[in-house]
Image (cartoon, coloured by chain):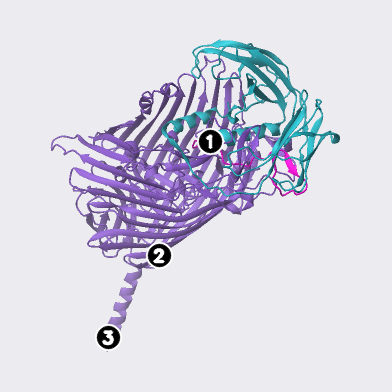
């Protein structure tokens, strides 16, 4: 009997000790597209039995630590064939994999429940993800694939109207979006006043828009982060893609210099809208110039299995001119150098250096009697280091630091007259740490802390104002000089702490609840008081008289994957509430152009936004698309201390871009191998507008009298677009593939109102009228020929 | 020059877009006073008193009669304006350089268009204005903005010292060129002390459309305060810079009139001070 007891005890002891002494090993590596060598972002890597896993990061890297023994890793990615790899885990393994694209577009592509790409499982909420393939299928305005315009079809994202650059996310202004192209900040996201985005869709690999629950690694803007990852360049064989359209054409070439080691990519676009302008019978129009072009270049060098170097550049310009008399051009230039290093099999590092330059020039040529050139520029230099530590399948830690150096050159005039506004310098350092932790089978937390600071630096001569009254040119009592390197204003305090918390609670395999809170701070501001921004609007840094803006957002969401008749759908419902303070507004009649003491025209106010976002999405099968609906409100309060600093009598008023209802229906149907068709229908509440309450007269001129701000609404907006794509059958031996894209924008030709304005009817004084302005008054067809080889 | 960029961009959008006149119902509101007038160093002081009316009333706004208007020079009363006709008041008093002028308006209760009250304008100093050095016609060819033809020009020299602001008013055959889009103001911020005489800086063309020979042009160059300049620019932008995606936001057109009897009462209009120089040219 005692022998038995001893044996049982010994057995138990050995079992226990083997439990404690069980070792864990790490499998890590990079996942790529087998056809092009491109790193794949967000591939789900899960151990089949344990159901523990991770996803590849922005550079295709994954790291998974599991207990010793046999493991089967399942690699799963939308649009690609799933791969199951059996491995024997008795040491650390470095395992790279190439996935093959799913050959038949019509085949059912399975996104397994355990896949971490699955919206139900990931901690990410308030995120919209789009792959370039999806965007290219949608009906486009004038045949141009436009990423920003496609984003506005998702809930929570809107614009103030057609012909306006920028976009609004959850009631935030257009300068509250951090737009990153391969980690380089982009200041103006559109060409030609909002008609085309600066991102060439052929070069884009993936887009992620964070509307809330913004991770700690991002900062500097209040409302959103648009993280755009570009392709690296085909490292296996030379290829190209391009298109010829009615308004613009594009060409992309990529290929390896050394197979699988050194690859390059060059892409360019150029519009020729000016050709159509020449057709106008109107002499004042037909001699004008109007076009844009942009160039993307990339060079990637895989030094060894653990280190890769990336060099990328962007150059874009918009050019507008009135014959030879007046010229205006503007655009972004960015250059980025990045170095990935897999420091250990659990620690991934990325080091980035960015140079970004946004400038505009307007002026008259030198031969003219009155000649001038007006330049304005904002340059920034960013350097950052980001680390990800894949501790265990349940715990991932991210940390890093970053610094941005800004040089603002608001205005410089040369020529018959010369004048300039002072240069402004600033530094924005930040540091962050965050942890994604699986607390239990059901609960995952992603919590982090970001700490940012901002220093406005000299040299600079700053105006001093009389105490106790509104800042005005007439209340300047003197100036103060700051030397180079001297801090004019420092924002280094506890308000720079930005907590970012998100939680995901899995109710069961198909549904989850998520909640998030984030605080964000913004130190640079776009100064613009017109409804749509103009390219000559400038950015200004926070300083003695301009405080950084702060936002707090909470969001709560319900996510569910549904299967009806074997078709899979994703359903999400989110509510959010956001409060903003120190958001800038403008005094009545503010004169913002060439203003040194810009603070005399600004008033700091508050904002708040809240809403409900619903999305039903289908990503697989012949019919794909989504229905998105947003019910929201965004409003402002401007009630300064002194007279002249109140808007709408100091009461809350609707923001210019407040749209109560925003419904988008997007659908694409693959009829057969050759044809697919698509449609988009949008409905939006008209935006707010101010109507006059009376008329007055001055020297015979009738002027409107306003007693409120944004108290009325423009009529509702709705529009239908169609598209059809014809893909030519690819010759079995040939490399050349082509397709035709047909589209009609605004099919039922609705004259959607952009605004309503009031004026004296031409040639008749005393008779006033209300006029509705529409940007597009008719349907607009387009044809584009696309090819790749 | 400041608005050139905006206007040209506006052109771009305007050519592609469309405008439709629509019917709108606007709610009525309580009438506000509008006090407009000026004192110069050459003419009688004049004031037009009116009230606001519903935006689509489509007729001249009501004139306010029976008011008492007192003119002050450096806070001393120098006269009471005489009511020439309903709403139009004047006093043959000329202003002097360097002195500050304002008016006090008393509207008695019982006026049919407006509730009674007492208003004052913020005093304005009469500032210096240079002579018009030259005024002549030039034949212009190959200008992208206008057809070939004779156009009128004028020149002047800005005195040294930043802070001189001017307004230019033009009469064509004795009719005022006074639409909102024709309001012309100058600030010497960029060209203080310089001369518009085709030697230093080019002379200024003050009418842009082609006119027949023999047209009578009269210009008046007046000195104005910065506050009045801002008021005129606001008036121009609120009434003529409309109809594009880059419209400035709506703003109340507050001038320099304050209601003393009730500080919360919104009051509109402007009483300004100008020293003026005039010249005539026959094309």
Q: Which residue is mark 2?
A: A513
Q: Nearer the viewer, residue A579 or B124?
A: B124
Q: Which residue is mark 3?
A: A3
Check the residue under mark 2 and report the chain it is in: A
Q: Quadrant of residue A751?
A: top left
Palette colour of chain A = purple
**Do marks 2 and 1 share a subunit?**
no
SS category of the residue bearing label 2: strand
Q: Residue at x 29, y 59 (%)?
A: A569
Q: Which residue is mark 1?
A: B242
Looking at the picture, how far across and down is residue A396, in whole percent? Answer: 41, 57
Depth check, mark 2 against mark 1: the one in front is 1
Q: Nearer the viewer, residue A124 or A741?
A: A741
Above or below — where is B176 with respect to A529?
Answer: above
Palette colour of chain B = cyan
> From mark 3 to mark 2, how far is it between C-alphas?
54 Å
Looking at the picture, how far across and down is residue A770, in whole percent? Answer: 51, 40
Q: Is residue A491 visible?
A: no
Residue range in magenta is: B243-268
Q: Quadrant of residue A281?
A: top left
SS category of the residue bearing label 1: loop
> From mark 2 to mark 1, how far is it between C-alphas?
48 Å
Q: Residue at x 47, y 51 (%)?
A: A659
Check the residue under mark 1 and report the chain it is in: B
């Amino acid at each position: 009997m005692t022998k038995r007891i001893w044996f049982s005890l010994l057995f138990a002891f050995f079992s226990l000790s083997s439990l404690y002494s069980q070792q864990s090993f790490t499998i890590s590596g990079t996942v790529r597209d087998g056809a092009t060598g491109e790193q794949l972002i967000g591939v789900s890597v899960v151990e089949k039995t344990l159901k523990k896993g991770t996803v590849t990061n922005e550079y295709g890297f994954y790291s998974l630590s599991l207990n010793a023994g046999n493991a089967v890793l399942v690699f799963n990615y939308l649009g690609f064939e799933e791969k199951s790899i059996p491995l024997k885990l008795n040491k650390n393994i470095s395992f790279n994999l190439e996935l093959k694209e799913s050959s038949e577009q019509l085949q059912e592509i399975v996104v397994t429940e355990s896949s971490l790409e699955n919206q139900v499982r990931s901690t990410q909420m308030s995120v919209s993800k789009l792959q370039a393939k999806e965007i290219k299928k949608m009906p486009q305005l004038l045949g141009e694939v436009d990423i920003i315009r496609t984003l506005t079809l998702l809930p929570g994202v809107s614009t103030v109207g057609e012909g306006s650059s920028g976009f609004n996310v959850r009631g935030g202004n257009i300068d509250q979006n951090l737009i990153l192209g391969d980690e380089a900040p982009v200041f103006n996201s559109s060409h030609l006043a909002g008609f085309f985005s600066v991102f060439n869709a052929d070069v884009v690999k993936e887009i992620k828009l964070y509307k809330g629950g913004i991770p700690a690694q991002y900062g500097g803007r209040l409302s959103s982060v648009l993280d755009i990852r570009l392709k690296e360049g085909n490292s296996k064989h030379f290829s190209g893609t391009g298109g010829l359209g009615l308004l613009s054409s594009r060409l992309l070439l990529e290929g390896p210099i050394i197979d699988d080691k050194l690859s390059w990519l060059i892409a360019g676009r150029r519009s020729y809208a000016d050709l159509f302008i020449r057709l106008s019978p109107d002499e004042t129009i037909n001699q004008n110039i109007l076009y844009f072009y942009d160039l993307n270049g990339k060079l990637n060098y895989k030094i060894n299995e653990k280190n890769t170097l990336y060099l990328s550049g962007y150059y874009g310009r918009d050019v507008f001119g009135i014959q030879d008399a007046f010229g205006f051009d503007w655009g972004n230039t960015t250059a980025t150098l990045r170095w990935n290093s897999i420091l250990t099999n659990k620690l991934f590092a990325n080091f980035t250096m960015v140079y970004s330059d946004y400038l505009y020039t307007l002026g008259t040529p030198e031969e003219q009697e009155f000649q001038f050139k007006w330049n304005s520029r904002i340059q920034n230099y960013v350097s950052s280091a980001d680390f990800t530590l894949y501790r265990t399948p349940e715990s991932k830690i991210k940390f890093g630091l970053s610094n941005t150096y800004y040089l603002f050159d608001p205005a410089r005039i040369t020529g018959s007259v010369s004048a300039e506004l002072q240069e402004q310098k600033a530094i924005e350092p930040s540091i962050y740490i965050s942890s994604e932790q699986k607390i239990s089978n059901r609960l995952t937390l992603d919590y982090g802390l970001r700490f940012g600071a901002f220093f406005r630096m000299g040299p600079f001569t700053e105006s001093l104002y009389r105490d106790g009254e509104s800042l005005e040119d007439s209340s300047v009592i003197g100036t103060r000089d700051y030397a180079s390197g001297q801090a004019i204003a420092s924002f280094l305090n506890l308000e720079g702490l930005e907590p970012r918390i998100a939680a995901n609670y899995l109710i069961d395999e198909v549904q989850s609840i998520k909640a998030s809170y984030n605080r964000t701070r913004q130190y640079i501001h776009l100064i613009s008081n017109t409804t749509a921004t103009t390219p000559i609007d400038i950015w200004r840094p926070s300083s003695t008289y301009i405080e950084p803006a702060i936002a707090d957002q909470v969001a709560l969401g319900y996510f569910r994957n549904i299967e009806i008749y074997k078709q899979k759908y994703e359903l999400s419902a989110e509510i959010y509430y956001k409060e903003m303070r120190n958001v800038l507004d403008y005094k009545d009649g503010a004169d913002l152009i060439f203003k040194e003491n810009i603070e005399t025209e600004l008033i700091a106010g508050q904002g708040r936004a809240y809403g409900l976002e619903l999305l039903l999405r289908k990503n697989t099968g012949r019919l794909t698309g989504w229905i998105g609906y947003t019910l929201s409100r965004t409003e402002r309060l401007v009630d300064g201390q002194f007279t002249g600093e109140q808007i709408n009598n100091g009461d809350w008023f609707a923001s210019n871009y407040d749209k109560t209802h925003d419904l988008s229906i997007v659908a694409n149907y693959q009829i057969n191998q050759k044809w697919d068709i698509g449609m988009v229908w949008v409905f939006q509440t008209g935006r707010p507008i101010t109507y006059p309450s009376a008329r007055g007269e001055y020297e015979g001129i009738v002027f409107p009298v306003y007693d409120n701000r944004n108290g009325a609404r423009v009529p509702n907006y709705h529009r239908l677009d169609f598209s059809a794509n014809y893909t030519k059958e690819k010759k079995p031996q040939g490399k050349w593939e082509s397709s035709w894209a047909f589209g009609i924008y605004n099919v039922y030709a609705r004259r959607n109102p952009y605004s309503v304005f009031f004026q004296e009817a031409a040639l008749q004084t005393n008779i006033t009228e209300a006029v509705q302005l529409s940007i597009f008054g008719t349907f607009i067809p387009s044809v584009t020929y696309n090819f790749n080889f | 020059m400041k608005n050139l960029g905006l206007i040209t961009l506006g052109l771009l959008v305007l050519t592609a877009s469309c405008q439709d006149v629509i019917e709108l119902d606007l709610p009525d509101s309580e009438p506000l006073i509008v006090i407009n007038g000026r004192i110069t160093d050459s003419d009688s002081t004049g004031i037009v008193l009116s009230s606001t009316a519903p935006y689509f009333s489509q007729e001249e706004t009501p004139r306010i009669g029976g008011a008492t208007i007192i003119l002050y020079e450096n806070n001393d009363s120098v006269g009471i304006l005489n009511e020439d006709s309903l709403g139009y008041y004047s006093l043959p008093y000329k202003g002097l350089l360097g002195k500050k002028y304002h008016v006090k308006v008393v509207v008695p209760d019982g006026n049919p268009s407006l509730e009674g009250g007492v208003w004052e304008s913020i005093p304005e100093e009469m500032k210096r204005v240079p002579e018009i050095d030259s005024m002549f016609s030039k034949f212009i060819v190959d200008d992208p903005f206008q057809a070939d033809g004779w156009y009128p020009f004028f020149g002047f020299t800005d005195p040294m010292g930043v802070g001189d602001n001017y307004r230019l008013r033009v009469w064509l055959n004795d009719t005022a060129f006074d639409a909102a889009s024709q309001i012309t103001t100058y600030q010497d911020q960029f060209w203080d002390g310089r001369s518009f005489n085709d030697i230093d800086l080019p002379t200024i063309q003050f009418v842009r459309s082609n006119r027949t020979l023999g047209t009578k042009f009269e210009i008046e160059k007046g000195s104005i305060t910065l506050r009045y300049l801002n008021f005129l620019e606001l008036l121009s932008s609120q009434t003529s810079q409309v109809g594009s995606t880059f419209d400035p936001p709506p703003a109340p057109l507050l001038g320099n009139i304050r209601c003393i009897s009730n500080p919360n009462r919104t009051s509109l209009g402007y009483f300004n001070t100008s020293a003026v120089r005039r010249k005539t040219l026959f094309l």
